[in-house]
Image (tube, helix red, strand yellow):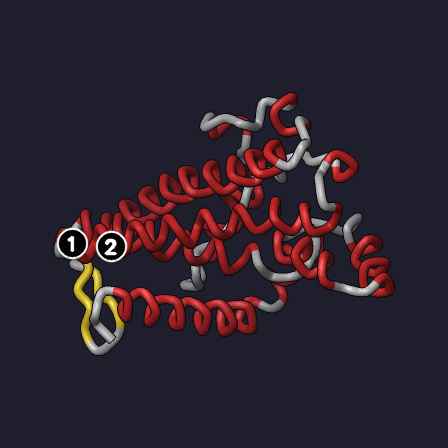
Amino acid sequence: MQGNTVITLIVILVVVLFSMVLHELAHGLVAYWLGDDTAKDDGRLTLNPLKHLDPVMSFLIPILMFLGGGPIFGGAKPVPVDTKNIKHGPWGMALVALAGPLTNFLLALIGFLIGVWTGLIVVSNGMPGFVNNLGGIIMMEIVMVNLGFGIFNLIPIPPLDGSRILYAISPDGVRNIMDQMETLGIILVMVLVILFPSALSLIMNGALEGILHAFAWLVGGA
C-alpha cells in the first residue's frame, strides 16, 4: 500500500510539472500573439520547467491536497505580462488568462480519450473507472490533475486566471476592489486552501464530476 502511495505521488508530481509548464507556456504565447514581448524577453516561452517552478504552488499545494485526499491542483510562477502592450485591453488579458485553463482541459480530454482507446479507462453508467495498474494510475492523474488545474485556476480570486476573466466583464467599482486585492495575491489563495479545504473540495469535486460526465458522454458512455 505504501509503495503504491509513493508511486502515485511521483506520478502526480511529474504530471503536475508537465501540465503547469504547458499552462504557463499557453499564457505566454497568447500574450505574445496579442502584442506583449515580456514573457518572451523573460525566457518564459519555453518548455524548461525550471523557468516556471514555484515552490508553493508547484509542489507544496499539490502534495498537501494529495495527502488530504482532495482534488489535486496547483500552479506556477505567473507569466509576466505588461497589460499596456496587450491588444484589446481587459478583454485581451482575459484571453491570456483563459489560455492556461483551456490548455489543461484539453490535456485532460486527450488523456481521457487515450485512456478509453487503450482500455486503461472504462466508462460505466456515465462515469469513468481507471484500471488498477501503473498505466491506469498515469492516465487517471493526467485527467484528474489537469481538470483540477483548470478548475482551480478559474476561481475568480486574484491572481488566479478566473479573476482576469471576471475583471473583463465587471464594472469599474468591482475592478477597483480587484485591483486592491491583487497585492494580497498568494496569501488569499493559501487562506482558501488552508482554512476552507472542505468547501473548496466540495466545489471542485462537483465541477470535476460534471466534466467527467461530459467526457463520458463524448465517448458514448452516458
Which of the numbered marks, if any, corresponds to residue 45? Answer: none
Badge 2 vs badge 1, beta-carbon distance below 8 Å: yes
Pick the front one: 207 or 37: 37
Question: At x 44% / y 50%, what residue is drawn?
Answer: 104
Q: Amino acid at mark 1?
A: Trp
Residue 86 placed where, x, y %?
71, 38
Question: At x 58% / y 22%, what residue is drawn?
Answer: 43
Query: Circle 1 sits in a helix, a strand or a loop, which is it?
Result: helix
Left or right of residue 144, residue 102 in this image: right
Left or right of residue 73, residue 138 in this image: left
Residue 205 placed where, x, y %?
44, 70
Which of the numbered marks, if any, corresponds to residue 113? Answer: 2
The CA distance from mark 2 to mark 1 is 6 Å
Q: Residue furthest front?
A: 88
Pick the front one: 115 or 82: 82
Left or right of residue 116, residue 110 in this image: right
Q: Amino acid at mark 2?
A: Leu
Which of the numbered marks, if any, corresponds to residue 117? Answer: 1
Residue 191 placed where, x, y %?
66, 60
Q: For mark 2, does the 10 Å Cα neighbourhood hold few (<14), some (14 to 19), or many (20 or more) residues?
A: many
Pick the front one: 173 or 139: 173
Question: At x 61% / y 32%, what residue is drawn?
Answer: 32
Query: Circle 2 sits in a helix, a strand or a loop, which is it?
Result: helix
Q: For mark 1, does the 10 Å Cα neighbourhood hold few (<14), some (14 to 19), or many (20 or more) residues?
A: few
